Image (cartoon, rainbow, N blue to C red):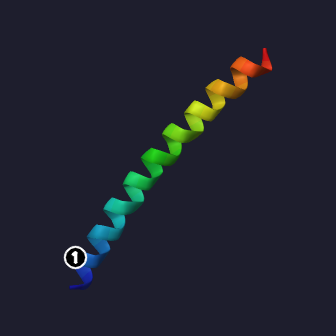
Amino acid sequence: MSKEVLEISILVDEKFDVHFNLTEGFLGIILSVFGK
């Protein structure tokens, strides 16, 4: 039971990290475009 919960939380963390990195990347592109 504990292992399953741990694995699920790890999968969620990985997906969240990827989504956060993509969002940060898009924000960086937008900022660099408006910065120029």
The local crowd at label 1, few if under 14, some if 14 to 19, many if 20 or more residues have their Cα within 10 Å, is few
Residue 4, position as x, y percentages in the image: 22, 76
Seen as rendered, the residue at the extreme top is 36
Image-based side of 30 in relation to 13, left or right: right
Seen as rendered, the residue at the extreme right is 35
Q: Say if 13 sits above or below 35 in the image.
A: below
- Which residue in the protein does label 1 denote? 4
Image-based side of 26 in relation to 5, left or right: right
Image-based side of 27 in relation to 1, left or right: right
Residue 12, position as x, y percentages in the image: 36, 61
The residue shown at (49%, 38%) is 22
Residue 30, position as x, y percentages in the image: 66, 26
Q: Say if 33 sits above or below 19 in the image.
A: above
Image-based side of 16 in relation to 32, left or right: left
Asked which quadrant contains residue 31, the reply is: top right
Give the number of callouts. 1
Asked which quadrant contains residue 2, the reply is: bottom left
- Residue type at mark 1: give it: Glu
The residue shown at (51%, 42%) is 21
The residue shown at (79%, 21%) is 35
> Element at badge 1?
helix
Quarter of the rendering occupied by the C terminus = top right
Quarter of the rendering occupied by the N terminus = bottom left
